[in-house]
Structures are given as structure tokens and as C-alpha cells.
């Protein structure tokens, strides 16, 4: 008997070794042509209008990068991901071509003189609309280029020494008689990258002396003094002024610059730089900052503020640091700074009348700041108009409340409330005030020319779906006049108001069968002129059937989803087919708001790399963006009954599909990405509704995110049973359906460490579950390399074919034939 057990054990080990070897030998795979062709379809160009509204710039975008590109050296440090060869971001999409055309019509003309293989980023118009600047990433660095609008020709301005390590654009335009550029350059004599010594100088020590520092889980943080040295090496830059003829002048000394922001008139420059001590708990943007003001010739004018390290902050989504924050220029003045300071110590739990106060300070910034209005909720931003009008938004996450008020910047007093709303009440959202460029080239409130009316633009959510609109808002009375609203069978969004008096607007219009293109609408003459003509990128999708469906959860909550069915499929004639349900849970405080319709039945089906819609071409029905609300009315929090509500949402969707004849209750897969993966694992652990599940880049053990996750503010120590109950890792023994886990090995999203999938898979395997774990090399939270994306789709397709079987007419459907 002992020998039998020995042979059995050896056989099992040999089998596992062979299986492991087979898995290691499996290279990147590709899905069927129908899916692959959609991935390889050329992306639709981006559209950017010139400051004067005379020109449209078309930005041709790159397809997916190769895994070779993604495998380039990468530093994950200080909350950044840097390519050490280029001193720029390691994970970027690029523009590969530029074309320009007049707004009112004409031919698309390509910009000449671009690099041989363009890899363009940070594209922006000069303030006068005569030039277009952009960076070009080479194999060894980043160059700064400019294109002349009149000649349609581009030329290189700098060598490949632009420093783009810090997020955001590495350059900015400086206004003047002739526009110029300020950019961050790599330091010329910085030497070699600091090398890590084999023998450490001593241990790495962190210490906390009594003060609470409850921070969420961040990735890619500094971990040692050597990391600090490397971070400083790549983040240190030299501020440089550059004229259009290529003359460069270094300003000041090198530093860890994070921001260079000229005043509207160009006479002053707000400059911020990081200083030590660095932190091993938070990313670079919470390191100490020194904020200075320079003159337009690069000379130091004054120190504005010294911002301390932000490691310790109160708990809660509405928590902020103390002291001045959010420094920015008033858009309607030549050189006036504005900022906000907390009046509650930054602590949302403090019961105070006012939370924040706005302050303003005119050049030359020597006097006392002018006290602006106070906000009863947390300050959410200001939109400047002129000396008589500015609009402030304040918000409070816990109640989902937003208040919008107005004040006179030149004679600031109390805010006059214009309106308030709940962010959850989509049907009641008033829209956002529209802006236009003023004489300084900055965006300010768009008015009717008399200062009596503003203009609101919104998505126009309704029981029939989103219907975007423009309203004229009377400042004195608060009454609205509807200018225009999108009409079926189109989804049309107002991109801009081109002329208030003539009522000319620029819109982006699409439908079920037509991709988005831009139009000029003359609302007075009811005339429409098309100005772009982008083709349908996916011919195979033209005959796919799409509809928005509505159904009800067992507790009365109305739900919706977008249903895609294969070409030619009729449930009455063809019967049930396999179904893929794809969703992402959302938290609500109101049952009424949770049941509101989201999206539009008239939008064009734009298929992203992570989409679930591909499988409609494999003969499956796909219920995409299925409503999965999690509701906590009154004093209850949504997550108090998270699992029960997930199951209720799943049951309601399946019952509706049964009623429609799409499914008989079998062959239903559930899937999602990130929090949707978390949802998927919980549904498999706590119900038997689904045949199998696909979970991508999820977090499955909430004790690994102990200071909160998603929109949960309570910590593990405050609600341990909630963390335990919501963690599918803790219930791995209950998962009795096959599950496919996919995760990027370089995931940098807060909370979704790759170890989440690795440990969950180990728990599933330990309990004998049918589980497959796919770890994608070099991929982050979203997958970018063409090989990775195609392999992910192959894995999903193979998994579903295995556990769900073939779809409608799959064998005879010509769309699925490999060619």
C-alpha cells in the first residue's frame, strides 16, 4: 500500500511538472481573425481646434505597441514609471502623424518635415495659433519640435534632452509679442546613473512617533536611500527658455521641478520643486514642495509657499492637507494668484460651518492676500469669468452633494448659490458652465456678451438614455432656456459654441452604425455642415444587433444594460445561445438614483482592447455595462450588504435574458476588470448563477488594502467582518465554477498588486477549484502591448469555448474563419 501511495504521489508530481512545463512553453497566442481584425483597426484621429477657431488639427494615433517596446528598461520609483533611456514616461501612446485643415472646410493637409518614424506627445497650440509644439521620443531621449501653421512644416528645436520624467507636459508656452517656450531639460553634466552598492551602509529604517498616518496602498514607492539617489538623478531638470529660432537660455539652478506655470500676461512664472525629506509611504506628488515666483526673464522674484510632506492626513475622501493648496492663476487677470486653505484642519469629521476659503494675491505679490469666499463643503474648483463673475463648485462625497455658487472676484463676498444637486441623480444634473478663450488665451466663462447669461452643457441623462444639451442660464433669475438637445437616432455632443450671436455650435455626432464625426450646426437656420469624415473602423460589426434593455431587481431597483446579439440571430427562431455578462459595481446612497438609466442606445460601438463585445462575433450574446449598483440608504453604507446585492443584480439580469429567450439559464459567463474582477470572484463564491467567470486585474483579499478600498472609507480595524465577508479569498473554498484569472505582472494600480491574483489562485488550487492564472509580462493595470492584448483575448475565447461551447452559427459564420 505504501508503494502504491508513493507511485501515486510521484505520478501526480510528474503530471504537475509536465503541466508546468507546458505552460512555460506556451508563447503568445492570437484569437480568431474576427477579433484580431478589430484590434488591428486603425485608431480614429484625435481632433484639436486652434485657439482662434480657424483650424482643426487631426492627430493620427498609433496602434498598440509591441511587447518589445513595453519590455524596454523601466524604473518604478517614487510613484513614477520612467524609461531610463529617454528620461520620459515608460508607458505612453503616441501620435504618428499630423494633418491640418480650415474649420470652415477644405482639404486635410499633412504637416511636412516630421521625424521619419514619428512618436509624438504633448501636442499644443501656441497662444496666437500660429505654431504647434510637440515632443518626439527617440530611442535615446526626447526632442522638442514645432510646426508652422502657414507653411505646414515642422522642425526640431532641441536635441534629445527634454526631461519628461515628471507627469504632465515637459514644456509650456510663454505669452509675448512672439510666443516662446519654457521646458525642463536634463542636466548636462549629471554624470552616470547612481549604482547600487553591493554592501549596504546599514538597514533601511522608518519610524512613527505617535501620529497616525493612515495611507492607502500605493505602488512603485521609494524603498531605500539608493532609490532616492536614482529618483533625484532622473527627476532633476534645468528650466530652459527657448525662442522660436532655437536660442536656448538656462534659467536658475537645476532642481526637482514639478511645475512651471506662466501668468496669463507672461510676466511672472509660478515654479514648484520637490525637496527632501522624501517618503517611502506616499508618491512624489506628496513630497515637500517649495513654490516660488520668477519673472519672465527667469529671475527669482519671491518665495510664495513651502508645502510640507503630506504623509499624515486625516481619514476620509474629503480629507485634505492643511495650509495653502491648489495654487493657480486667475484666468481673467494679467497676474493674480489664487489658492485655497482648509478651515477645518483638513479633517472631514470636524463639525464646522465652513470647510475651505479662497484667497487671491495680485502681482507683485508683496501685500496681504485678499480673502475670498468661504465654502460650506469642500472646495472643488473655480471657473473665472471677469471681475464681476466667477463660479465656485463645492462638494461632499459622503452625501454626494454638489453646490455651485457665484461671487464677484474684484469685490469678494459670500457665495450666491446658483444651484445644488446630487452627483448620483443623473437625471437632475444641470451640466457645466461653458468657457471660451479670452484675450490672455485662458478659458473663462462664456457669456451672452451682456454679462446677463451663461451657458450650461450636459449629458442630459433621461429614461430614454443620454441626450446632451446646451442651456442658456439667466444669472439674475436662474431660469434656463434650452438652446439645443440631441435627438434620436443620434447621440450628439456639443463640443463648443463657435458664435453666441449666430448660434453656431460645434458637435460630435454618432449613431449605432456611424462613428463620431464633427459638424457645425447653425441653430437659427437649422443647417448642419459635416467637417470630418472618419470611416467605420469595424465593418464586421455593422450587422451586429444592439439594444438597451431594462429590468428590475428583486427589491425593486430598476436596472439596465446594453445587449449585443450576433448578426441574424432571432431568439424565437434560434433559441438560447451562450451569454457573457460584463459589469463593474457602483456605489449609491439612494435606490431611486441607482435605478436611473446610464448611457445611450444611439452611441457608436467603440471597441476598446479590454471590451467584452468581441464575443458577439463568436456567436455569443453580450450584456455589456450591466447595472450592478450597491446601495446604502440613510445611515447604512453600500458595502454593508455588498454580496447580497451583487447576487441580486446577477439574478435580475439572468431573469431578463431568460424572459427574452436569449438564455435558458445555462451557459452564462460573468466577467469584469479591476473592481469588476472582484465582483466576478464574489459571484462565483456566493452563487451558482454562472457557468464560469473571467476576472482581470482584480483585488481579492481586502486585508491587503486595510486603510480602505474603492469608495469604502472604513478601515479593516473599524470593520474587520466587512473586509472578511467581501474578500473572495476568504471564501475560495466555495468557488465551484471554472475561473480564469488574468493580471499584469507590473500592475501599478493602488490595491491591485499582482500578488492578489497569485494568492487567490493558490487558494483556489488548494481547494481543488478549476482555475487558470495568466500573468502578462510587463503589463500594468490595463494591458497595452499588441501581443498581450491578443493573447488575453485568446485566453478568454479559449476559456469560454471550453466551458460554454460554440455560439450561434459559429461554425458557418464567415466572420470567424481564419484567413
Image (cartoon, grey):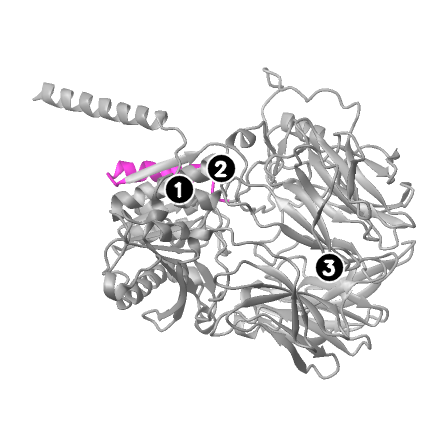
Left or right, 184 with respect to 464, comes to right
Q: Quick one: label 3 or label 2, which is nearer the N terminus?
A: 3
- Is residue 9 positioned above or below 313 on the image? above
- Kindly indicate the quadrant of the structure image that contains residue 482: bottom right
Image quadrant in which the C terminus is located: top left
Q: Are marks 3 and 2 in contact (CB under 8 Å)?
A: no
**Label at residue 55:** none
- Upstream in sequence: badge 2 or badge 1: 1
Q: Nearer the viewer, residue 47 or 377?
A: 47
**Numbered disc 2: secondary structure:** helix
Residue ranking furthest to the front: 107
Classify residue 758 as left or right of residue 197.
left
In magenta stretch: residue 734: no
Q: Is residue 179 above or below residue 355?
A: above
> What is the quadrant of residue 764 in the picture?
top left
Residue at (47% x, 73% y) in the render: 464
Can residue 290 be seen in the rendering of this structure? Answer: no
Instruction: Find out whether the residues at labels 1 and 3 contact each other: C-beta distance under 8 Å.
Output: no
At x 28% / y 27%, what residue is drawn? Answer: 19
Q: Which residues are magenta?
A: 751-770
On residue 103, which mark appears? 3
Front label number (2 vs 1): 1
Residue behind mark 2: 786
Q: How many marks?
A: 3
Q: Is residue 685 visible in this depiction of the protein? A: yes
Q: Position of residue 623 (x, y in %)?
A: 37, 59
Amino acid at each position: 500500500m505504501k508503494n502504491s501511495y508513493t507511485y501515486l504521489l510521484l505520478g501526480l508530481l510528474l503530471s504537475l511538472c509536465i503541466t508546468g512545463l507546458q505552460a512555460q512553453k506556451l508563447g503568445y497566442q492570437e484569437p480568431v481573425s474576427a477579433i484580431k481584425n478589430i484590434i488591428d483597426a486603425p485608431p480614429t484621429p484625435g481632433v484639436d481646434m486652434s485657439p482662434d477657431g480657424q483650424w482643426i488639427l487631426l492627430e493620427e494615433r498609433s496602434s498598440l505597441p509591441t511587447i518589445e517596446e513595453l519590455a524596454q528598461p523601466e524604473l518604478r520609483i517614487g510613484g513614477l514609471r520612467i524609461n531610463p533611456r529617454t528620461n520620459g514616461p515608460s508607458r505612453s501612446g503616441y501620435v504618428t502623424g499630423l494633418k491640418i485643415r480650415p474649420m470652415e472646410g477644405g482639404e486635410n493637409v499633412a504637416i511636412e518635415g516630421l521625424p521619419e518614424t514619428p512618436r509624438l506627445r504633448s501636442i499644443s497650440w501656441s497662444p496666437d495659433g500660429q505654431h504647434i509644439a510637440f515632443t518626439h521620443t527617440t530611442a535615446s531621449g526626447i526632442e522638442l519640435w514645432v510646426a508652422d501653421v502657414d507653411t505646414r512644416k515642422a522642425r526640431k528645436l532641441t536635441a534629445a534632452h527634454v526631461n519628461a520624467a515628471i507627469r504632465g507636459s515637459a514644456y509650456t508656452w510663454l505669452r509675448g509679442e512672439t510666443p516662446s517656450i519654457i521646458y525642463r531639460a536634463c542636466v548636462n553634466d549629471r554624470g552616470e546613473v547612481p549604482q547600487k552598492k553591493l554592501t549596504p551602509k546599514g538597514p533601511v529604517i522608518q519610524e512613527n512617533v505617535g501620529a497616525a498616518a493612515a495611507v492607502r496602498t500605493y505602488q512603485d514607492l521609494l524603498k531605500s536611500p539608493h532609490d532616492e539617489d536614482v529618483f533625484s538623478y532622473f527627476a532633476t531638470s534645468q528650466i530652459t527658455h527657448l525662442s522660436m529660432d532655437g536660442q536656448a537660455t538656462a534659467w536658475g539652478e537645476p532642481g526637482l521641478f514639478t511645475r512651471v506655470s506662466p501668468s496669463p500676461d507672461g510676466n511672472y512664472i509660478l515654479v514648484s520643486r520637490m525637496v527632501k525629506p522624501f517618503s517611502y509611504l506616499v508618491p512624489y506628488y506628496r513630497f515637500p514642495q517649495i513654490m516660488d515666483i520668477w519673472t519672465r526673464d527667469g529671475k527669482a522674484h519671491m518665495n510664495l509657499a513651502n508645502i510640507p510632506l503630506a504623509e499624515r492626513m486625516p481619514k476620509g475622501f474629503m480629507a485634505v492637507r492643511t495650509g495653502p493648496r491648489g495654487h493657480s492663476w486667475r484666468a481673467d487677470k494679467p497676474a493674480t494668484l489664487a489658492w485655497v486653505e482648509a478651515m477645518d484642519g483638513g479633517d472631514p469629521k470636524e463639525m464646522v460651518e465652513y470647510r475651505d476659503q479662497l484667497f487671491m494675491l495680485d502681482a507683485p505679490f508683496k501685500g496681504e492676500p485678499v480673502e475670498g469666499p468661504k465654502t460650506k463643503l469642500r472646495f472643488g474648483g473655480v471657473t473665472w469669468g471677469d471681475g464681476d463673475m466667477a463660479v465656485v463648485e463645492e462638494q461632499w462625497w459622503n452625501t454626494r452633494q454638489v453646490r455651485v455658487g457665484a461671487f464677484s472676484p474684484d469685490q469678494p463676498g459670500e457665495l450666491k448659490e446658483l444651484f445644488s444637486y446630487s452627483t448620483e441623480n443623473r437625471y437632475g444634473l444641470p451640466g457645466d458652465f461653458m468657457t471660451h478663450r479670452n484675450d490672455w488665451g485662458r478659458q473663462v466663462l462664456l457669456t451672452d456678451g451682456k454679462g446677463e447669461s451663461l451657458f450650461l452643457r450636459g449629458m442630459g441623462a433621461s429614461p430614454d438614455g443620454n441626450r446632451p444639451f446646451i442651456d442658456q442660464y439667466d444669472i439674475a433669475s436662474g431660469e434656463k432656456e434650452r438652446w439645443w438637445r440631441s435627438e434620436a437616432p443620434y447621440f450628439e455632443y456639443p463640443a463648443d459654441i463657435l458664435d453666441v450671436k449666430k448660434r453656431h455650435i460645434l458637435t460630435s455626432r454618432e449613431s449605432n452604425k456611424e462613428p463620431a464625426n464633427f459638424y457645425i450646426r447653425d441653430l437659427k437656420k437649422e443647417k448642419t455642415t459635416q467637417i470630418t469624415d472618419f470611416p467605420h473602423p469595424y465593418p464586421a460589426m455593422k450587422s451586429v444587433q444592439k439594444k438597451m434593455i431594462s429590468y428590475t431587481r428583486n427589491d425593486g431597483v430598476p436596472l439596465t444594460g446594453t445587449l449585443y446579439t450576433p448578426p441574424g440571430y432571432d431568439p424565437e427562431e434560434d433559441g438560447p445561445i451562450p451569454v457573457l455578462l460584463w459589469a463593474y459595481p457602483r456605489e449609491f446612497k439612494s435606490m431611486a438614483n441607482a435605478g436611473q438609466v446610464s448611457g445611450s442606445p444611439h452611441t457608436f460601438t467603440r471597441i476598446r482592447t479590454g471590451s467584452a463585445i468581441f464575443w458577439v462575433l463568436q456567436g455569443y450574446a453580450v450584456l455589456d455595462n450591466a447595472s450592478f449598483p450597491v446601495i446604502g440608504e440613510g445611515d447604512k453604507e453600500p458595502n454593508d450588504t455588498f454580496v447580497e446585492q451583487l447576487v441580486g443584480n446577477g439574478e435580475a439580469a439572468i431573469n431578463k435574458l431568460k424572459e427574452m429567450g436569449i438564455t435558458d439559464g445555462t451557459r452564462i459567463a460573468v466577467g469584469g476588470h479591476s473592481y469588476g474582477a472582484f465582483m466576478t470572484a464574489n459571484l462565483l463564491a456566493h452563487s451558482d448563477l454562472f457557468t464560469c467567470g473571467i476576472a482581470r486585474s482584480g483585488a481579492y483579499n481586502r486585508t491587503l488594502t486595510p486603510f480602505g478600498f474603492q469608495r469604502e472609507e472604513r478601515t479593516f480595524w473599524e470593520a474587520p467582518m466587512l473586509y472578511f465577508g467581501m474578500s473572495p479569498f476568504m471564501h475560495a473554498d466555495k468557488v465551484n465554477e471554472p475561473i480564469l484569472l488574468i493580471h499584469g505582472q507590473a500592475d501599478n494600480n493602488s490595491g491591485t498588486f499582482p500578488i492578489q491574483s497569485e494568492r487567490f489562485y493558490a487558494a483556489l488550487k488548494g481547494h481543488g477549484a478549476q482555475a487558470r492564472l495568466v500573468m502578462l509580462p510587463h503589463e500594468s493595470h490595463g494591458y497595452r502591448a499588441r501581443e498581450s492584448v491578443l493573447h488575453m483575448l485568446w485566453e478568454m475565447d479559449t476559456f469560454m469555448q471550453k466551458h460554454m461551447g460554440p455560439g450561434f452559427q459559429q461554425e458557418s459564420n464567415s466572420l470567424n474563419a481564419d484567413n
